[in-house]
Image: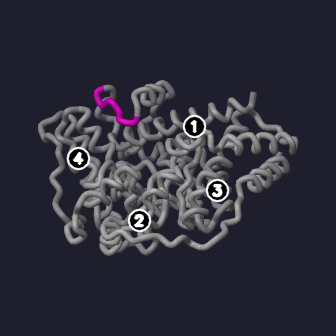
Amino acid sequence: MAIVSQKLDEVLHGLAFEKIEGESPQNESDPLLARLKALGTEVWIDTGELEKAQEIWKDELTALTTNNTLANQVVQSGVMDKVIEDTIHKIRQEGLDLSEEEMILEVGFVINCKIALRLVQAFKVKVSVELHPAISRSIERTLHYGRRYFMVCPEYFTVKVPLTPEGYLAVRTLRQEGVPINFTLGFSVRQNYLAARLANPDFVNVFLGRLNQVVMDHNAGTGELVGEKVTLATQQALRSARENDKHVSSRLIAASIRNGEQVAFLAGLDVLTIPPKAMKDYQDSGKLPDQVVSHIDDSIEPGVDPQHRFAKRFSELWQLSEEFRNFVDALVARPDLDSMQGEELDKIARDVNLFHPFSEDDLNKIQEHGKIPDLNAWPDSVALDDLMTQSALQSFTKDQNALDERIRSFLK
């Protein structure tokens, strides 16, 4: 089986690999983006669609992010159909015996590489590629695919790993091996503080737009500045961690940005990854560069009704308690950390209510409801950040399933 696996890796690497050619393109500068850069912010584009990125690309942009949803949008357009056909044909031609599930994972690997490499070839910048959600609870498979993505394009690929117990531990190993990591699906200060201290990924995330939305969906306030509050508090916590621990270098990405006002408000953050629509909104806002200022150290009053029964659940997103700091201190000091399994971390973290033991029925219910959870369906004992992460992961799973179905249609 080891020989077959090695042969499979070699074949798939050959299919996925492309030599990056040509010089970096010359692009126009944008004064508003230059202002973000002057304030210390890297600006990325959040899309897998080459044409949309080309429409708004400016000199200040330094990377792109993709995810399962964005990859599915590209695949459903049909531009990857030839890649699917060729990959299936080559695997069969080489006599590699794969189950349908394995075939879909491998074809999906090649598709993700090709989508990302189209962007790399066009812009010569780093691109984040996301793992298949089906492997999110496996350290072994996360390591396997993480290493393979990196080998395809070590100069430009950053591997996106979702926030799960196994994800935390796999990222720790991958970073020790020098694989660039974008640790995704974060929704709170504490989730990202743990990631930085435990695994030191290159980047962590706050999906801020979804946090504003969950407040509005439950009539718990206006929702304004809720995600921004969590994002800025996370930035402050990471800045402190970097200053106090020489082993921590993780930077923060503000993700799930919805409009140009959020872009301007988050000036000074480590990284903003912005969908094309929100980018154009910012560029067309009419703001003068000197009107864009940093709010990193401002006191933010989020739009949450303090009398609402969910108010405490929301406020916990931007808090980093002494209890949790002590938990992290004790965890990173454990001598067995590098051999720890996901189940062990899951169990240990129950002491700080970090992971809820969702059943398969629970996950199906979450997926059916969509990326913004119904808090009325879950007791207060389920931490909101964990529930938001699961909702995001299940939402990506639903889109990945659609992508997988397109691949499956070529197997018949």
* Disc 3 from disc 1: Cα separation: 22 Å
Which residue bears the numbered disc 2? 251
Q: In the rendered structure, which amino acid carries the disc numbered 2?
A: Arg
Amino acid found under the numbered disc labelled 1: Gln
Query: Disc 2, disc 4: CB below 8 Å?
Result: no
Side of 376 relative to 17 (left or right): left
Quadrant location of the C terminus?
top right
Mark found first going from the N terminus, 3 or 4: 3
Asked whether residue 351 appears in the rendered view, the answer is yes
The residue sitting at 37% across, 66% down in the picture is 270
Tell me the residue that label 3 is attached to. 149
The residues tagged by marks 1 and 4 sit, at their Cα atoms, a distance apart of 39 Å
What residue is pinned by disc 4? 315
Q: How far is the residue under mark 3 from the one under mark 4? A: 37 Å
Residue of label 1: 76
Q: Amino acid at mark 3?
A: Tyr
